[in-house]
Image: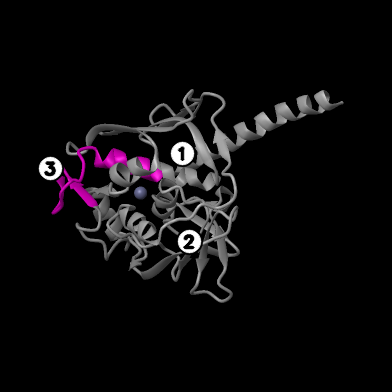
Amino acid sequence: MAGFGFWSGLDVKLEFHPAVANSGVVFIRTDLPGQPRIEANIANRVSGPRRTSLVDNDCSVEMVEHVLSALAGMKIDNCEVHVNQAEMPGLDGSSIGFVLALKSAGKVELDATREITWVTEKTRVGNEDSWIEMEPTDDQSFHLEFLLDYPSNAAIGKQNWETNLNTSEYCEQIAPARTFVLDTEAEQLRANGLGERVGYQDLLVFDQDGPIDNELRYDEECARHKILDMIGDFALIGTDIVGKFTACKSGHRLNSQVVFELLRQTAATTATTTPNKKRLSA
Ligand SMILES: [Zn+2]
């Protein structure tokens, strides 16, 4: 599939290729000598404004969250993503284009079990205003809720949306939800030379009346898109997740903090169970 990067404005081709069990999701830069590999792992995440990028083997891939979200939503754990530019195609600002490509390619079950990361203790990351809370669930679900509040924009305003994630829910209710910006932010980004190729049809640009020259796909499309991003960012943990997540006015930075917190909880659980096992066998 082909498109252009929203930030770089550069044309890019992306291909999904099958991968062997337990290899995870790996991006491959086909435009660079030696075709370097960049693993979709939280250790490779670098901070940047408004998008998720990865650096490994001295090269980068940018705005990977919608690609990772599509793979996670489709329950595809092992995949090589071949790209000939650093930045992923922005498409229509959602992940539905990636989902449709993956659906037409199909998936096969591999002879390996998928690891699960469990939320073991109720925890909150962030501050008073912007936060994500995670807690254990009794029903083995991956539950996500997003609370959005844009007092400065009447058309977005307050929205909330929640889901118990499964593949059909993802494809029908989440993947089509598009990225959004305020018209004032769009002007600022353009003034900084970003997003020059991006038009009103490529994502949602909101003024006080709603999206400019565009129609909403859902009433709470913005809240749904924030959940799409959470799924993509959380996928950097490299396992399935069981737990309940409630997010308020958060973004990519807090999403990555959640992944680190989950890793801390997993390490703590392993540390407390290992000595017991040793004692039992002694
Ligand atoms: Zn997004």
Q: Are marks 1 and 2 in contact (CB under 8 Å)?
A: no
Question: Picture coordinates of residue 134 (x, y %)?
Answer: 48, 28
Query: Left or right: where does residue 78 sit relative to residue 14?
Result: right
Residue bearing mark 1: 254
Instruction: Name the element at disc 3.
Output: loop
- Amino acid type at circle 3 is Asp
Left or right: residue 198 versus residue 33 is: left
- Alpha carbon of mark 1 to alpha carbon of mark 3: how far? 29 Å
- Residue placed under numbered mark 3 in the picture: 209
What amino acid type should be assigned to the residue bearing mark 1? Leu
Determine if residue 96 is in view. yes
Q: Is residue 11 above or below residue 163?
A: below
Which residue is label 2 attached to? 61
User: Which residue is located at x 60 percent, y 64 percent?
Assistant: 57
Give the mark nearer the N terminus: 1 vs 2. Answer: 2
Q: Residue at x 21, y 50 (%)?
A: 205
What range is drawn magenta here? 204-229
What residue is drawn where x is 47% and y is 67%?
Answer: 82
Sort mark 2 into few (<14), some (14-19) or many (20+) by Cα contacts within 10 Å. Answer: many
